[in-house]
Amino acid sequence: MPIDRPMITSLLFFPDKEIIERPGDYGLTAEDVFPMSADGVKLHGWYFQARENKGALLFLHGNAGNISGRVHKVTGWVKRGISVLLIDYRGYGQSGGAIQQGDDIVRDAQAGLDWLINRGSRGPVPVILYGESLGSHPAVRLAVKHKTAGLVLEAPFTAFTDLAAIHYPALPKFMTESLLKDFRFDNLGQIAKIQAPLFVIHGTDDATCPYAMGQRLFGEAPQPKEFFSVPHAGHNNLPECAGEDFWKKPCGFLKKENRLS
């Protein structure tokens, strides 16, 4: 029986069009930008220009919501002189289109990276890739393809098939393999090939993307790398639990590796 792709994507991805917070809510200003993906989808993002412009960070967010739910995570980077592009995947927020294939979010991430390098960073500055949960996959894929100043992964997973085994244990393995054939998002199979220093932040009580997955990815990644374990933190409260270290530690790691201006 053929797989109903729209049904599969509706079960896997949870985009939202509603804007829940804006940059001004945090005393920030942002430029509306509209990168175009290689297959012609008009995307939307917010670009936060830092005064010092020590580097530029591409923030690839997690599954639910849109960029408006991540503005609070931008504040600490901009404060430290890192400009940030928050971009929505197709179907999320004000971005057009809808996710139909497994590589769609990688194409969208590439469009964001191209915009950041060519238009947003105001000169040649170090570029950092940041992947939050679902965003860890396009971030890893870009870090394999491009040499960047750093790769920061927040609450990453090994593969979607591994998550399915945990969250849907009643489904036989052959069924999940079939359903997720085009959406494996195999970070574990890619992590050894990244071309950037790696910083992983993960909560010990993460019930969505288990802590052990972050540890396993970290173990397979090349040096240099650093792991920041946040005790008692879950999947969605890492900034609250980690405090200023949520930004201070990855910035410190990148500075130690001489990756920031």
Image: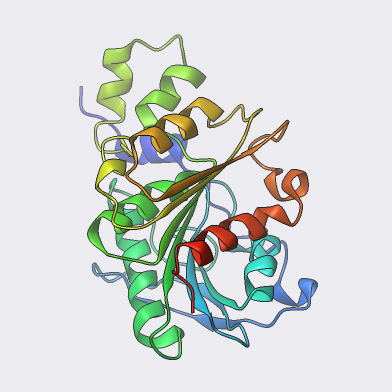
Q: Say which quarter of the image contains residue 30.
A: bottom right
Position of 189 with respect to 244 (left or right) is: left
Q: Is residue 115 above or below residue 71?
A: below
Which residue lies at the image location 76% right of the left edge and 43% below the top edge? 241
What is the tally of numbered marks visible in this picture? 0
Pinpoint residue 144: horizontal percent, then vertical percent: 26, 54
Q: Is residue 100 above or below residue 90?
A: above
Which residue lies at the image location 30% right of the left edge and 17% below the top edge? 175
Position of 109 with respect to 199 (left or right) is: left
Pinpoint residue 244: horizontal percent, then vertical percent: 74, 57
Pinpoint residue 261: horizontal percent, then vertical percent: 49, 79
**Applied colour scheme:** rainbow
Which of 124/134 is in front? 124
Position of 187 with respect to 258 (left or right) is: left
Q: Is residue 87 visible?
A: no
Which residue lies at the image location 27% right of the left edge and 51% below the top edge? 103
Q: Say which quarter of the image contains residue 181.
A: top left
Q: Is residue 214 above or below residue 260?
A: above
Q: Say which quarter of the image contains residue 219.
A: top left
Position of 240 with respect to 11 (left or right) is: right
Which of 197/101 is in front? 197
Q: Residue furthest left?
A: 1
Q: Is residue 42 visible?
A: yes
Pinpoint residue 174: horizontal percent, then vertical percent: 26, 14
Q: For the N terminus, give its image quadrant.
A: top left
